[in-house]
Image (tube, rainbow, N blue to C red):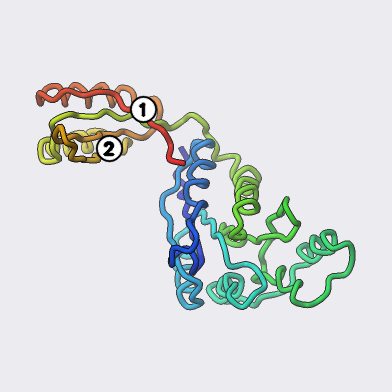
Amino acid sequence: MSARRFGLIVIGDELLSGKRRDKHFPKLVELLGARGLELEWVRFISDDAALIEQTLRETLAGGDIVFSCGGIGATPDDRTRACAAAALGVPLERHPDGVAELEARFGGPVTPDQRLRLVEFPQGAAIIPNPVNRVPGFSIREHYFVPGFPNMAWPMMEWVLDHHYAHLHAPGSRTEQAISVDGARESDVIPLMERFVSAHPDLKLSCLPSTEPQGYRLELGLRGPTEAVTPGMEELRAEVERLGFPWTPVEIVPEQ
């Protein structure tokens, strides 16, 4: 898999208040996973302008490929476009390709001016086509800004991945396997896990404990390059057996 890291910013007071539930995080995980890529981080932030600008200053300095969902409309609470410009230290300007998209959408010159605010992007930005209503998003410095509406954001994110990052695609190159270990607590497997992590730095080892009526149980999972996960899991199962704990395979089902 490519060493490039992908991140996600989701913007909106309505998400943090619980009025609406985010759907972008699991969808981007799905889109990346289908291409052999992974999401490394996600941030949920409010519509506060200072916070948006601060967040973008940090992510622009980090060198990651970043998707940002929400806040690019024309109402006063849509602050992402202006905050991105401020974080970059450039002015907003009306994008000619964006204007052309709006003219195609509305069948001629665009009025009133409020509609034209939709295509005022940071200087130097490029547009991201919107297949739903032709009101584009924008990109700059490997940051990709799309609407908060899932029916628009998701095909736009998919377009970005296929248009700009096809060279990173490696479908099937990563996989995940897991086992359920009955009767074990975290403390029982910590030495095992420490040895395993040291010996297999290319694999991600996880431990999910649970307490059930019938006793303690752990789920041990491995994620990483497909060719390394299967032999790694064989080794992990053997180590669990040496500790005297029974195990059963776990079917990996993505959350909906």
The answer to whether mark 2 and mark 1 are in CB contact below 8 A is no
161 vs 98: above or below? above
**Residue 36 spot, x, y in % from top left:** 49, 36
Question: What residue is drawn where x is 48% and y is 44%?
Answer: 29
Q: Which residue is mark 1?
A: 251
Q: Circle 1 sits in a helix, a strand or a loop, which is it? A: loop
For the point 50% across and 60% down, the residue is 20
Residue 129: image location, x then y, percent: 71, 54
Apparent side of residue 243 relative to residue 76 in the rendered image (left or right): left
Q: Residue at x 71, y 54 (%)?
A: 130
Earlier along the polypeptide chain: callout 2 or callout 1? Answer: 2
Residue 23 vs residue 28, the one in the foreground: 23
Q: Is 228 left or right of 243, judged from the image as shown?
A: right
Label 2 vs label 1: CA separation? Answer: 16 Å
Question: Which residue lies under the disc numbered 2?
Answer: 205
Q: Residues within 10 Å of mark 2 (few under 14, many from 20)?
A: many
In the displayed orientation, state which residue is furthest to the front. Answer: 213
Instruction: Name the amino acid, label 1.
Output: Glu
Identify the secondary structure beneath mark 2: strand
Instruction: Name the mark on residue 9.
Output: none
The 10 Å Cα crowd at callout 1, few under 14, some 14 to 19, many 20 or more, is few
Q: Look at discs 2 and 1 and give the one toward the viewer.
A: 1
Badge 2 amino acid: Leu
Q: Quadrant of residue 231?
A: top left
Q: Where is 42 relative to 207, above or below?
A: below
Which residue occupies 29% across, 34% down?
Answer: 221
Instruction: Tell me the quarter of the picture where residue 218 sits.
Output: top left
Say which quarter of the image contains residue 127: bottom right
Q: In the image, residue 179 lies at what x, y percent?
A: 27, 28
Whether 187 is drawn above or below 245: the answer is below
Position in image of residue 110 (x %, y %): 84, 70
Q: Nearer the viewer, residue 246 or 221?
A: 246
